[in-house]
Image (cartoon, rainbow, N blue to C red):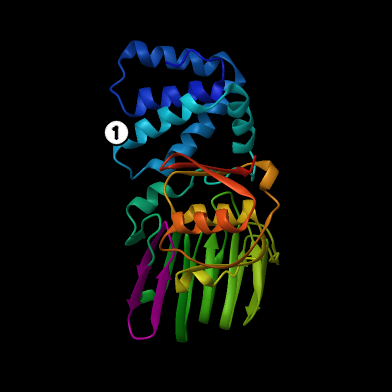
Amino acid sequence: MSRTDDPVEQGIAWLVQLQYNQPDAQTLERFERWLAAAPEHALAWQRVNQASERFANLPPALSRSTLQGASRRMSRRQGLKLLGLCAGIGMLGWAGARTQALPGLMADYRSGVGERRHLALGDDISVQMNSATALDVDLARRRIELFYGELLAEAGPRPLQLSARDGSLRGQGRFLLRQEEAGGSLLAVRDGQVALTVAGASAIVAAGERVQFDGLAIRPAADNGLDPWGWSDGVLSARGMPLRAFLAELSRYRRGLLYCRDDVAQLRVSGTFQLGDTDRVLALLGSTLPIHIDYRTDYWVTVSGKA
């Protein structure tokens, strides 16, 4: 266990101890005592454990060394600041755990981090899956269940039914559905129309429209400068997008953690970037913006202002 008084570093140390070793009964007892000792410990454990999802498919020895290396390199001030960021939308790649991850493990189709898949389902249904997506398909009922992630569906002339965490859809044409890890969903319609139903509202979304919704309400989608369709062509296309938001989007296509410091969070990004090489995207940003990109490890990257 780490001897530091920083809850984040302690949490990382416990994560390594419990997840990558074989803890005995005494170790588990010590962990329970640490967890109950202070509210900060419980919060740190929750956030660090959520963050570990970004390393889920790495070799155990590599993810262990990455987490340990990150812990050693963090000062106490950085750790406390990082803990605060974990609790809010400013943390990149550390957003809340996917509540439907376990059903997703048994899904008919899944895509890994950075992987995009195309599914031809029958004569008139096709689906593109974005990075880290899981879904079930029932062709007989023309129904898709999205567990997590994002998809782009094309269907016609008969409507396609789609159920998801925040609501249900019935539509034809070309439309995409994205479930945010931190909560809420985005629906965008390119062609045709989609009937959207949530617990507290319903709406018809026509071609060219975008809406955001949760389990209770539907509202027009805010424009954050991101082209929501770009990923289907293998690109990340932005227009005046805040750097922090851009990096949050980029982090969906790479393993590990991508952390943006406050001093550069509001710099603006415009351009079209190939998703096949996220390190090249970071290099391009570094050559056009006044930022410093620090690879603490291959899977822990910090973006800050130039000194």
Residue drawn at (35%, 31%), measured in percent from left and top? 64
In depth, the one of 229 and 148 nearer the eye is: 229
Identified by mark 1, the residue type is Ala
Image quarter hosting the C terminus: top right
In depth, the one of 125 and 195 nearer the eye is: 125
Q: Residue 165's x, y, as percent?
A: 52, 57
Around disc 1, counting alpha carbons within 10 Å, would you say few (fewer than 14), some (14 to 19), or many (20 or more)?
A: few
Q: Residue 296's x, y, as percent?
A: 46, 37
Q: Residue 135's x, y, as percent?
A: 39, 62
Left or right of residue 130, residue 263 in this image = right
Dot 1 lies on which element? helix
- From which residue to which does the magenta span run? 117-138
Left or right of residue 87, residue 276 in this image = left
Verify whether residue 127 appears in magenta.
Answer: yes
Residue 165 visible in the shown view: no
Residue drawn at (63%, 25%), measured in percent from left and top? 77
Q: How many numbered circles does the render carry?
A: 1
The residue that mark 1 highlights is 61
Q: Residue 292's x, y, as percent?
A: 58, 45
Verify whether residue 181 appears in magenta.
Answer: no
Q: Quadrant of residue 278?
A: bottom left
Image quarter hosting the N terminus: top left
Left or right of residue 75, residue 211 in this image = right
